[in-house]
Structure formats: structure tokens, C-alpha cells
Amino acid sequence: MSDNDLTGKVTYDPRAIRQDTLDAMRGDIVVGLIEFITNSDDAYRKVKKIGKIEIEFKGLEKPFKYSITVRDHARGLSAAELKDKFLTIGKENTDNSVANRGEEGTRGLFGRGAKDVAVFGKVRFKTIHNNKFSALEIDGFTWDYKILALDEMVTVDKYLELGLNEGESGFSAEVMVNETRSTTIPNSKKIVEYLSNHVALRGINENQTVIFNDLRANQSSILKPTKPKGELVIDKEVTVKGYEKKAWLKIWKLSDRQLSECDEYSLHGIIIKDKKTNFQNTFLDLKSRPEIGWFHGELLCEEIDDLNRQFDENESNRESVDIKIVEKNPMRLAKKSRDGLDRKHPYYRSLSIILNEELKPLMDEIANSEGSDKSVSEDLQKKLDEASKLLAQLLQETLDEEDLDGDFDGGPGPEDSEILLVPPHKIIEKGKSGYVTAWIPEENFDSSKVSLTFGDTPNFELLTQSQNMIFEKHPTRKIMKATIQIKAINFGTTEIILNYGNENIQSKIECVVSDPDPTLMINELIFEKDTYYLSPLRKRTVKVFAPAEMHKDIVKIKISDNGVVVPQTTELRLAKSKGYCIGKIDVLPGKDEGSFLLSAIHDSGSVETNLVVKDINPNKGPTITIDPKNQDSVTRSSLIPLPGLLSIQIYLKHKGIRKLLGVYSNDKYANIDSHVVKAVFSEIVATEIANYVIETDFAKRPHLYRDPSSLIRKQKELMTKFNVAMQSFLLADFI
């Protein structure tokens, strides 16, 4: 039998389970509790009764921080049901298969959900069903389970343990939070507030009696959501374009405007729901409108459940499914992370159309009313309009820059560390060995402080242990270096970490099935492209690549003619998370067109590339408008992207601006033309455009923004660029 004839099932490793469940829970214990509470509500639905759900919060000893238990008095589970529901990942929840499942089915996510909560440390499930006791626990680090009891005759102690009266059935789910998953104990008042108003629990808190008991403080609270007060302005059936079932839309205009962000806890927002589940509190495409604080509503869509079921059935019968059905339902609409609806789904777009048609006119009416008063002088508005034109040009030039950030300018990289592993990303062929070099400063070097940490995987073998590392002086730099040998036994990924004193640095080791990224295999000096096309008088950054071992080497730069200005040298630096170095060459053409030869010269050799300077029409970027509005909002400003237009709105009644403006009289604010207000306007506009550039670049190159410092650094750089442009118009008289 050949290797091609072997078949089998792919193993779902505990590490992968842990990663998936961490993503699902998002590190938020409230998300885990929602799973437990909705499970208890589902149990009451199944027996068609209203009941009590008790939440118990208590401290624990190490290695745990605390535990939270959720109990109900519904029906419990038999031993077979307990194993079936909690020891299999991804199995369909058969409770959803009932004929009227849209009303009486449960919210279970096909066997995900409650067991995912184990990722916080450990979960323990206990149940009494028909006077039989069963229990099991799951370790969220190893994903091993332990059955504690199966269909044992129940005792009085067990009834007391589950808070049940003798003869009752019920279920208990407890999460024990490990101290490595939670460094602090959450505030119980905050938990009560969050659980009371979370969009997924609002209906449950109104229909069931949900009690939160803090055993540490001996306090008890009943969870009740805050009810909005306002006037019902829309109550009608609406068509969901492209889909069979209609939806029902209700919208209230609130008595008091809400100034917080619209999220799962906020009073304002449109709740997207079916008859059994609240999926999301949102305004969909209208979320950036400042008028959202005036509205609360519900959009009842019974077809959401049908589409979820249909998609999962299509996955099971994918060979026979109609392609037209797939086009209308290409992915699961309700995300299994309980993070709302998938905005890429066509149904989401159809819901957005409903709100644009029904809610947007109400928002426009409020906007016209609030913005009817003239708020800025004609002179200031004229300067804002002039600045907008320059900013639009500057924005397009920035977006056109191929090296907006470069692979090493986005934040602290490996070159900023005192110690290094070269390269930071290494590809090794299966069955062969590869080498990574450790670099440590020569000054006060102490080999006893050196240690290596290697990923726990059978796919790689560390052949050079810490105690076997041989350090020698680098021939040209003041560093000590040692070679580390690693063997790739099978395909996969791991990492090696070099520890020295209080510092550590890591290198990614990879053995891939497909052809590796050729840039990871660079072994000589090379330009990124054979030819670069430049516009006259417009600076362009050109990249030269080199092996990782050339880190911090100096490369000489030469140009064949004086018509282009280039630096004399460039320093090679390690690219973030890559296996090579990059040298950045800023090239500034003159006003004349022509062809030029650019050379990079190193001791190991030289390379050349062609520069062609030609006057071409630049890309037409979006128009920018700056619109100060006599309104309040959650934020000082917002940037609303429209086709071919970026509308920057500044809200003058925001508390961060209003106090600077002075008294309002004669159709304007007293201080609206002051240099302080104009400086604030400049900073606001620069921030909005900088953030827009970062978001646009992040969509293309997310690897450049892996930590907060990289975002902050890039934002400061861009803000300075756009702020200077704004101030040249608004503050010309003061500068």
C-alpha cells in the first residue's frame, strides 16, 4: 500500500482546542457565564416552565482564584445526555430539531458553548435527573475529562449540593478560574451590571428569576435589565430583500439621549433577534452616526435560525446542494463565538438596507434640527474647505506610498533588543537540520545566564542544548555568537526562545508542506524589484533585501546620474518576523524624466535596479469634507467613509470641545475663531485621517501592527504629518 492510499481522521489536538476556546471566550468570564445561563434557560424552555436560575460567586484557594456556579431547577440530564452533550465537540444539538424549533428549540451551538468555559481553568457539571445523580469535570488546559458519577442513586447531600428540594431535578455548572487565566478577582457589582444588561440575557432576565449570590460578601441581587423610556416611532413588518420571511421592526425614540458607545450592554441600539435569541445590539451601517444615542429598537428576524440550520445541513450534503442556495447563504449567519451576525453574509446586508430605509430618515431629521444653527464663521469654514483639498492630496500620496511603514518601522522589533536570534523566522526542510544564531552583547558576557526554551512538539528536535552552546566573538561587532541546531522531523511550526538575564527573544521555526515564501530564503543582496517607476519630484522608498546574517551591515548606494537624489549609505536591519534584512533607500527624482541605474554595494557583492522617472497622473483619492456640527456625541468627532468621500464631523457640543467655545450668540460661538479652538480642530482632523490610514494599511499588512506600541508610533508619525498641513491653513496668522 502506498502513502497515497492511507486515509483517516485529522486529530483535534488539545492545544488547538485551547486556542479555539480562548478565542470563543475572548478572555471574558461574563461570556462564559452567558453560556451557563442560556443553557439553564434552554432547560426551562424544554419543560415549558418559568423558574429560578441561581448564580453563586465564591473565592477559591490556589491554583484557582475564584469559582462561579450557575444552577437551575428545570429537568437535569441523564448520564447518557451528560456524556453526549459535554464530551463531544461540535455535535448537533438535537433539541433544535423539534417541529416548532423557532419557538421551543434551544440556543445550543451544536455542542460548543458551555464546555468552552473550561478554558478559564476547569468546569464541573452536576445533575440530578429522575432521582439519579451524575457528574463530570473537564480540565481546560489538557482537555482531559473525569467522570465523577453516573446515574447514582441520589442522596440528601446531593440535593443540598445542587440547591434542590428532595424529588426535584436540576443542573449545576461551575467554572473554577485558574490564577493564570485571571490575575484579579472581578468586582461582583460589575458582574451584576453586565449580566443584567447584556443583550443576550435581557429576555432571560425578564422571564426567569435570575439571582446573583456573592458568598464572599454575603450579598444577593436579582438581575433585571434597565428598561428604555421613549416614544414608539416605528412598529411595522418589513421585507428582507432577497429572502423569504419578512421581519418585524420596532423603534423607540428615547426620552434622553445616550452618550455611551453602542455595544452589547448599551440602552440604545437595535437588537437583532429571533423568537428565542438576541444576537446583537447594533446599528449596523449607521453605527457612526452621532444620532444613534436617541434610538432603541428590535428587529425580529425568524429566518436567522432557518439560515443557520440550512448552512449546517448544506455542509453535510455539500455535493447535492443547489448553488443558488449557497449564494444566498454562503456562511453561518450567527457566529459561533456569540459575537453577533457575520457582516459578510448577504442577509446582514439586507438588514442594513432596512435600517437605512427606515431609521436613517429619522436620524437625518434630528441632524437637520441639531445642525440648523450656524456654528462657525464663514472665514473659518472657508479655511476648512481649503485645508480639505490639501489633506485629500496628502492622504492619497500617503496611501500611494508603497512603504507606508516598512517592515521594521512599526514598533519595537528584534533589532531593538540587546540580544538576538538570527533569523527571527527560519524555514527548515523536512528531515533536515537548520541553524539559528544567538547574538549577545560582549560587554560583561556571562554564559551561565544563557538558556533556551523550545516549543513542546514532536515535529522538531533541538539538537543544541543550552549547556552545549559554544560562544565565540563576532569578527566585526562587539557581540558573542553561538550556533543552535534544530532538526525538522515533520511538518509544523514551533518557536525557540533565547533567555539571557532578564531579556528574552524568540525565533519562529517552520517546516511547511507547500513551497515556502521565497523572501524567507534570501541568501544574497537583492533589490525587491528589477524596475521602479517614479513621478518627478515625488519621493519613493526602494527596498534592498539581504540575508539575516547581514543585520546592521552598511551598504553603499550609488546612482548613475545626478537627476535623482539618493543617500550615500543605508543600514540593513532585520525585518519583523521574517528571515531576512531590509535596507531602506529614499529616492527623490528631479523634475526631468529619464532612466537611471541604482546600485547597492556590499563587501559580499553588488546589485542593481532600474529607476524610470515619468510624469503620470496620480491616483484619484477620496474627497475630504470637514463639517463642524452643533451637536453632542459619544466622541469629539467621527469619520464617515462614503463612496469617493471622507466626511469628518466635529461635534461642538461634546464636553471636550464645548468649554473651549465660549458663549453662543449671533449664530456662532464667541471663541470659534480663537487659535486654541483652531489648534484643537487641527488635532482632531489629523487624528481621524491618521486612523483612517492605519486602518487601510492594517487591512493589507496586519503583521506591522502586532502590539500597541506599533500603533501608537505610527499614529504619532501620521498625526504630525497631517496636523502640520492643517495648521498651515488654520493657524497661519499665529505661526
Image (cartoon, rainbow, N blue to C red):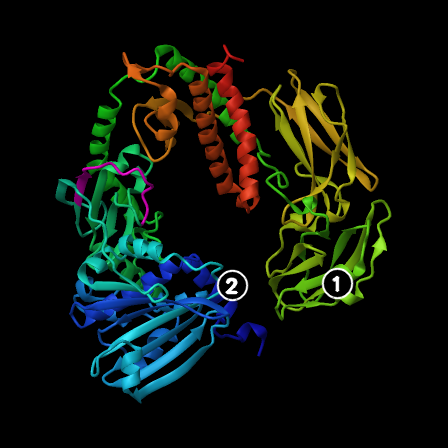
The image quadrant that residue 20 belongs to is bottom left
Q: How many marks?
A: 2
Q: Is residue 261 magenta?
A: yes
Is 178 magenta? The answer is: no
Q: Residue at x 36, y 71 (%)?
A: 174
Q: Position of residue 155 (x, y in %)?
A: 28, 87
Q: Residues within 10 Å of mark 2 (few under 14, many from 20)?
A: few
| Part of the protein shown in magenta | 250-264
Depth check, mark 1 against mark 2: the one in front is: 2
- Mark 1, residue position: 485
Circle nearer the N terminus (1, 2): 2
Question: Residue 484 at what x, y percent from top left?
Answer: 75, 61
Q: Most extreme residue toward the front, as rendered?
A: 217
Instruction: Report the front residue among 607 and 261.
Output: 261
Write down the residue under mark 2: 180
Which residue of the protein is positioned furthest toward the bottom in this rendering? 153
In the rendered image, which quarter contains the C terminus? top right
In front here: 257 or 553? 257
Residue at x-position 31% and y-position 34%: 289
Looking at the rendered structure, the secondary structure element under dot 1 is strand
Q: Identify which amino acid the numbered label 1 is placed on.
A: Gln
Q: What residue is drawn where x is 18% and y is 52%? A: 245
